[in-house]
Amino acid sequence: MKILALIPARSGSKRIPNKNIRLLGGKPLIVWTIEMALKISGICDVLVSTDSLEIQAISSTAGASVPWLRPSKFATDGASSVDVAIHAIDRYEKDHGKVDGLLLLQPTSPFRTPEYTERGIEKFLDYSGDSVIGVSPIRERPSWMVAIENNVIKPMNVRSDDIDNAIQYIVNGSFYLTSPLTLRTQSSFYSSNSRPLICNSIIETIDIDTEADLEIAQVIKNTGIY
């Protein structure tokens, strides 16, 4: 089975300028994900989709395949990850033949491990499902949610008996493995048969979206936790 790893990395980023190539532990953020993906034996190629010559050069030096630049229409704020993934699959399959799965690895999760990634691939193979999605337990209790109306706290109508006795999960953004058929027909990484890849580690699933997130990641790296 051929599984293509895709790392999307456009140049534009509003919250963190040049986010994908900001340094973390002395190396560009995207390189963390490239180096991790290159350790996975079940991946046929590690492809970076970018509209940036600088990201292309950095990614190529790190060992990724970056044979073309992403068209500008797929590098806007309005372009979805699905749009980028389908474009990448179409281009890749034209030159290399069909793939059985597309593994989307966002560069904003630098601490995901090869073991975690391989576990997700194994689940995809074992269940022969349409997709496997990375999820984490919700740390906050949903029954504690409140709304604020006119600067006044209003309790939400959430029944503790309905929610607190069940473990709730949130998509953590670190792992999406989907069949090309699902992507093309559903225009989504999800299907009615999507399987969860559960990760309990807060560090492995950290998602760098703000300067504060990047600072936390720097602390994690500097203290040797990861």
Image (cartoon, helix red, strand yellow):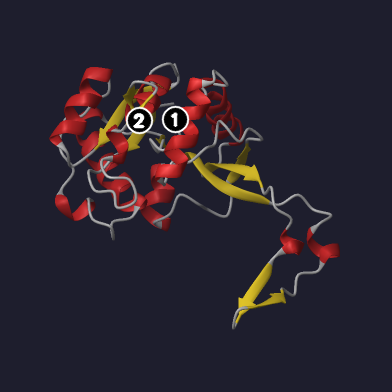
Which corner quadrant of the image does residue 186 belong to? bottom left
Q: Residue at x 45, y 49 (%)?
A: 189
| 150, 140: nearer the viewer | 150
Q: CA distance from mark 1 to mark 2?
A: 7 Å
Asked if marks 1 and 2 touch (Cβ < 8 Å), the reply is yes
Q: Is residue 111 visible?
A: no
Q: In the image, what residue type sits under mark 2?
A: Leu
Q: Vertical placement of 153 versus 199: above or below?
A: below
Q: In the image, what residue type sits under mark 1?
A: Pro
Q: Residues within 10 Å of mark 1 (few under 14, many from 20)?
A: many
Which corner quadrant of the image does residue 109 belong to? top left
Q: Position of residue 15 (x, y in %)?
A: 34, 51
In this rendering, position of residue 143 left or right of residue 10:
right
Q: Residue at x 20, y 36 (%)?
A: 94
Q: Position of residue 131 (x, y in %)?
A: 52, 43
Q: Helix, strand or loop at disc 2?
A: helix
Which dot marks residue 110?
1
Quadrant that contains the N terminus: top left
Q: Residues within 10 Å of mark 2 (few under 14, many from 20)?
A: many
Q: Position of residue 24 (x, y in %)?
A: 38, 27
Q: Which residue is mark 2?
A: 29
